[in-house]
Amino acid sequence: MFAFIVRRMFQSVIVLLVVGLVAFSMFRFVGDPIDNMLGQERTQADIDRLRTELGLDQPFPVQYFKFLQGAVQGNFGVSYRQGRPVSTIIAERAPATLELAFVSGFLAITLGIALGVFTAIRRQGVAANIIMTVSLIGVSLPTFLIGILLIYIFSVELDLLPSFGRGETVMIGNWSTGFLTASGLKALILPAITLGLYQMTLIMRLVRSEMLEVMRADYVRFARARGLSDRVINFRHALKNTLVPVITITGLQLGSIIAFAIITETVFQWPGVGLLFINAIQFVDIPVMAAYLMLISVMFVTINLIVDLLYYAIDPRLRVDARAT
Amino acid sequence: MILRNSAIGLALLAATSVQAADFKWASTTDPQTMDPHAVNSAPVLGFLNNVYEGLVRRDKDMRVEPALATSWEPIGDGEGWRFHLRQGVTFHDGGDFDAQDVLFSYQRASGEAADTRSWFAPIREVNVVDDYTIDFMTIAPNPLFPSSIANWMIMDQAWTEANDAVVPDKETGNFATINANGTGAFKVTAREPGLKTELEPFDGWWDEAEHNITRAEFNPIQNPATAVAALLSGDVDMINPVPIQDVARLTGNADVDVIQGIEARVIMLGFDHQAEVLKYTDDAGKPNPFRDPRVRRAVAQAVNVDAILATIMRGNAEAASQLVSPAMSGYSEANAERPAYDVQAAKALLAEAGYDDGFSFGLKCPNDRYLNDEAVCQAVVSMLAQIGVTAELDAMPVRNYWPELREGNYDMYLLGWSPGTFDAEHPVRFLVATPNEEKKLGSWNFGGFSNPRVDELLPAIQSELDAVKRQAMLDEVAQIIQDEQVYVPMYVQPLVWGTRSNIGLTQRPDNFFLLRWVTVN
């Protein structure tokens, strides 16, 4: 077990290093930050001076090494655009993204499971068919279009919800939360739906097909033969057995909700790390881009590591294999 | 943290007491710093013009008028300029304004770390005469100096020293990057970079307030569709810019107004004047046709600017004949005629230059710098095809674009230029003068155009005190630029803002938005 963990950790570190290397080798194709940092009346001497000061005249492996040197000490450098430490900026922006991801994840799971069960039980019903058709929209329409559509309907036409931003926030320690104010909660609704819609349809369709599968199983038929009520059969026997794959998928999707909040955040001007990353690309803010990419890869690597360890704990075959090698 | 919380508290108080005069506006770019000397860019200077002030400022029609200086006069025979400073002015923190602050701001804004350094290239030394008089001695007579420093903002020496921000710091930032302490009509009460900035009127402002705002909030909104939705739903009171394609839709809406004007920015095509050979397409390696003025003239006559304006700009822009718009000082009335759109004439010119069969070349173009820039380039490509010239368009984000131009990776390119001094001398200095690193000339003359007469006239223009003689020289330069067809000026970029219909404001051609002219009805 210990050897397995050490090996997996070692592999994770290698993955991280490679991600960083690839990221740094790409940065020079993103563009040149110098022109954004100097005004139109700059001279070639100014350009050269700034380039040297920022270390951009160095080959990218050297830049990468310097970044790693700082990163292991928790220092991600200073944003070119804002002139403030990247760690401070990310800490400021992270609550917005995490709250949004949490709410949309919650919506996706609860609604996804509820609708999945409903459409599986009332397979022939009109309502179920409508839900299934509408859910196709969730899968097929791109996120930004859904976002713009929601803004158009609920902000512009109906004037019910704010069209952008996070509303009023309250600071709890270093954490800015939108959960405690009315405008903060209202501002959450549209972005959360936009971000969670795809995951919700995914979960719903997964639950539905698993349910249909399970409903045909022998033990459900026996349960029916025993005269158990529909409710007990549906929820205690069928649903429980469909949840195993759902949990696996949901866990993996959690990472992507956080990582791919970028588009939703851009459409709603949601002040999270995704928007920060988009700004950083436009400005070629290399320290912010590097820190963001590393954080996201740390997150994915950690989730995968945990999943692997869970499998190891759950699946005895892995242990047998490990002993054999 | 305490400071910010109390500021938000104050803002909330103000918001509840007079709801009507709350004002929110949005633009695509957040000013990257609150330091007026750290970054010389339009979003920063435009925003900070609400907070800081210079010795002089520009009025609604871009004319220079007194601000922190009440009057100024040339010293002797053009040795420099004497400014008489306004008395009784205080900074937002209560500090007094005097000549020492001006001297300090000069040193700060002209230092190595400042991005505004080039503004002070003509200055030899600065002398404080008394508390409210200060002399700027120039290297040569400089008639334009007072009007060239309208965006040079004065900071409080005591405040910057107390907060350890004596030198602007663009790379790592300092206190002045997030905080501001000017003499202007508005003070910054809360600042969250990239999210929002809150302002309140400054009670101790020396000038009469024309606005009725009690609290203002700026939000950057990158996505144009989101900004339009925010305006339509009333979440913001003003947006800049309105996407050209949404103008018609917004004009038809009774709740919002579209305010249109033209910006100071002229959009033009540039050429490589130095390269011996073409660098792109199948013709790469063949002699560079753009070294021949007749070919450049043919391009000018082949581009149908009116069609571009009618279709791509939806009639919102104005054709340009020279490197500055008619609103700028020093505009050459004598050269107000642009080469007529004439396909036959263009073909004849090409034949004369020996290119009967046309040629092909590479056109570089940004796709996120100017309004509809890529579409304009596409139109240019199809118009050039009519005279048998094949352009291969390569459009890219501006962050990749400038490095490409610096490297000389183009045969022809698109450029927009907004003269910082609002004078015709500015583009000559940056775009036409022979590149000279030491004298800081021609730093945007990517194509390396060089003309001895222009180089000779430029210093004379810069130091000529007589307006008529100066204009004569500017006319001559404009004539040379037009004869040589150094660039192909196409149009002056439009300026399109959107407001709620209860908002009154003033749109200035430099695209600066000033809160002190806003009225909420």
Image: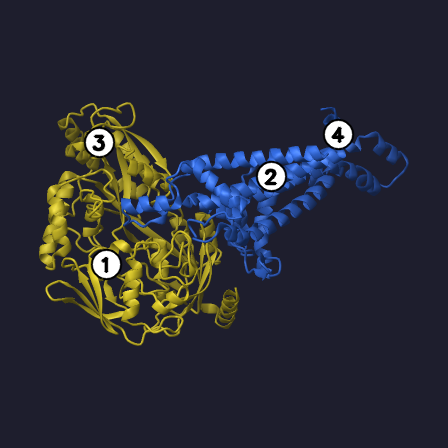
Chain colours: A blue, B yellow
Query: Residue tagged by mark 3?
Result: B275
Point out the residue furthest to the right here: A226
Mark 2 highlights which residue?
A300
Vertical relation: B282 (above or below) A39: above
Of the residues tagged 4 and 3, which is closer to the observer? 4
Separation of residues labelled 3 and 2 (CA atoms): 50 Å
Give the CA separation, mark 2 to mark 1: 53 Å
The disc placed on residue A319 is 4
Image spot of residue B168 (x, y percent): 36, 57
For the residues labelled 1 and 3, say whether their Cβ atoms are less than 8 Å apart. no
Q: Residues within 10 Å of mark 3 (few under 14, many from 20)?
A: some
Residue kind at label 3, given as amino acid type: Ala
* Nearer to us in this view, B226 or B93: B93
- Disc 1 residue type? Ser
- Asked which quadrant contains residue A9, the reply is top right
Q: Secondary structure at mark 3?
A: loop
> Hey, which quadrant is residue B136 in on the image?
bottom left
Q: Amino acid at mark 4?
A: Arg
Near mark 4 (Cα within 10 A), the count class, few <14, some 14-19 or many ≥20, is: some
- Left or right: where does residue A107 sit relative to residue B175? right
Residue A265 image position (x, y, % from top left):
52, 47
Viewer can see residue A123: no
Q: Confirm whether residue A320 shows in the render.
A: yes
- Residue situated in front as seen by the camera: B130 or B427: B130
Q: Are marks 4 and 2 on the same chain?
A: yes
